[in-house]
Amino acid sequence: MISRVRSSVKRLAPLGWKRAGQPRGLLTPEERARITELQDLLIDRFVEHREATANGQEERVKTLEAEIDSLLREKEEVEKWAAVGSA
């Protein structure tokens, strides 16, 4: 499962910048606000995940991985609907 989270980290890295193929201008103000909120939550969860991993807290690591996956799915849904709405 850790490899999934590591791949999620790679997907998270460019979040602050304009993504290729999807200009940020196509998002509504509400969508942009939610994306920003989700990014902040993801950063917090990744930091917590790193700390839990370093401390050997396996159950906490699993819980955080599930939270990270859920947040990433929600973020992708917001972006997907924004892209569909602009087509």
Image: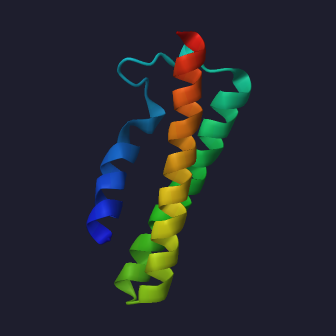
Residue 15 locus on image (x, y percent): 44, 37
- Out of 40 and 84, give the one closest to the viewer: 84
Number of marks: 0
Is 39 displayed left or right of 46 in the figure?
A: right
Residue 69 locus on image (x, y percent): 47, 58
Is 32 displayed left or right of 60 in the figure?
A: right
In this rendering, the answer to whether 78 lies above or below 84 is: below
Q: Report the colour scheme.
A: rainbow
In this rendering, the answer to whether 27 lies above or below 41 is: above
Residue at x-position 41% and y-position 87%: 58
Residue at x-position 44% and y-position 72%: 49
Is 12 displayed left or right of 67 in the figure?
A: left
Residue 80 visible to the viewer:
yes
Residue 76 locus on image (x, y percent): 50, 39
Q: Could you say which quadrant of the image residue 2 lies in?
A: bottom left
- Out of 45 and 72, give the one closest to the viewer: 72
In this rendering, the answer to whether 76 lies above or below 46 is: above
Residue extending furthest left? 3
Residue 47 locus on image (x, y percent): 47, 66
In this rendering, the answer to whether 51 lies above or below 27 is: below
Residue at x-position 45% and y-position 63%: 46
Residue extending furthest top? 87
Residue 39 visible to the viewer:
no
Q: Quadrant of the N terminus?
A: bottom left
